[in-house]
């Protein structure tokens, strides 16, 4: 029997026991990123807050770095109630519905204020779509602004041509192709290996992920493009949530709201601290040249226009709401 199945059975047994005796319940929570990552630190605090607020009635066991469920499968594991709760990168779902990728549109929202507004504008639509899959959104936290890491010095759009780019979602893959790069989907834990073996030579991600993967071991340049701020989302299976006593449900929602506020603050600090870590480790950190920025912007416009077309009424509603804020 797989360890996941064993855990699921153990959790099911525990919850049956719980129903009969109103005793403590334990939830397994898969997350994609490593323990030192600020998202994981925040998730662990959330779990602790829930346990404290419920006097131990609900215990959430965090399984970080894809150790219980691999990142691309976490959403469906929650959907099928294999696990009651979990964290994933929201824009991974862009192929299901373009709306899930709104936070990864180049230069639509490029700082924390704008990213927060975009989350407020898109949250109702995203909640509705996930609800259809029996997922309830608890909270979402933005990554720091996304920049460009490269083995080679890049000053114009032409320098990007032919570069092998590590990509993390379908929109980033499209952007890469638009810019003449060659994208490959690689999960965070596999980044160092992908660079070491020459599978990729560049990536677009945050200073947080650059620092946690020790980017200085395999690339020299970091350009602070501030292209977008993608988000992680924490979701619970609706059935599992509704099976909780009312007081526990309230404790979860309250801890989630606190985790959202705390997470966005952590993310802001992370941007400054981790950019410095890149510098301290000898990387060449700079703003992109105007030519390079213009190339990203031009490609971004193509991607956004395409997204608007594919996203239909929901996409339009989000952009309208966002533009009014
Ligand atoms: N780090 C994650 C998602 C966005 C980010 O900054 C990654 O690189 O996959």
Image (cartoon, rainbow, N blue to C red):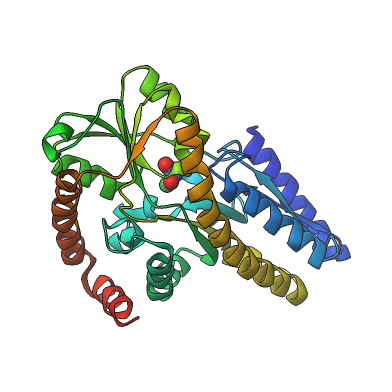
Q: Residue at x 58, y 48 (%)?
A: 38
Locate residue 3, reporting x and y percent.
66, 34
Q: Quadrant of residue 201?
A: top left
Q: Nearer the viewer, residue 40 or 272?
A: 272
Residue 64 located left or right of residue 163 = right
How many numbered badges does the structure rendering display? 0
Is residue 6 visible in this depiction of the protein? yes
Q: What is the quadrant of the N terminus in the image?
A: top right
Q: Quadrant of residue 303?
A: bottom left
Residue 192 located left or right of residue 221 = right
Q: Residue at x 43, y 36 (%)?
A: 187
- Outermost residue on the left side: it is 158
Q: Quadrant of ligand 1?
A: top left
Is residue 72 visible in this depiction of the protein? no
Residue 44 located left or right of residue 101 = right
| In the depicted structure, whether residue 39 falls above or below residue 56 | above
Q: Quadrant of residue 183?
A: top left
């Amino acid at each position: 029997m797989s360890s996941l199945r064993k855990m699921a059975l153990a959790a099911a047994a525990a919850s049956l026991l719980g129903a009969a005796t109103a005793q403590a319940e334990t939830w397994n929570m898969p997350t994609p990123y490593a323990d030192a990552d600020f998202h994981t630190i925040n998730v662990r605090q959330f779990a602790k807050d829930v346990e404290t607020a419920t006097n131990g009635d609900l215990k959430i066991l965090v399984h970080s770095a894809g150790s219980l469920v691999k990142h691309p499968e976490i959403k469906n594991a929650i959907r099928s109630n294999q696990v009651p709760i979990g964290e994933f990168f929201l824009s991974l779902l862009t192929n299901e519905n373009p709306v899930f990728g709104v936070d990864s549109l180049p230069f639509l929202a490029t700082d924390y204020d704008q990213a927060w507004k975009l989350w407020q504008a898109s949250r109702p639509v995203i909640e509705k779509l996930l609800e259809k899959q029996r997922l309830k959104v608890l909270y979402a936290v933005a990554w720091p602004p996304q920049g460009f890491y490269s083995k080679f010095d890049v000053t114009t759009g032409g320098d990007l041509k032919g570069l092998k780019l590590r990509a993390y979602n379908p929109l980033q893959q499209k952007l890469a192709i638009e810019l003449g790069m060659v994208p490959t989907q690689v999960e965070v834990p596999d980044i160092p290996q992908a660079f070491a073996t020459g599978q990729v030579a560049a990536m677009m991600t945050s200073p947080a992920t650059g620092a946690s993967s020790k980017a200085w071991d395999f690339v020299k340049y970091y350009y602070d493009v501030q292209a977008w701020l993608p988000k992680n989302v924490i979701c619970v299976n609706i059935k599992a949530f509704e099976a909780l006593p009312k007081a526990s449900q309230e404790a979860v929602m309250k801890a989630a709201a606190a985790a959202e506020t705390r997470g966005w603050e952590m993310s802001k600090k992370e941007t400054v601290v981790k950019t410095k870590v890149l510098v301290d480790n000898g990387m060449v950190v700079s703003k992109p040249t105007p030519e390079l920025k213009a190339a990203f912007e031009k490609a971004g416009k193509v991607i956004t226009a395409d997204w608007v077309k594919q996203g239909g009424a929901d996409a339009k509603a989000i952009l309208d709401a966002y533009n009014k804020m």
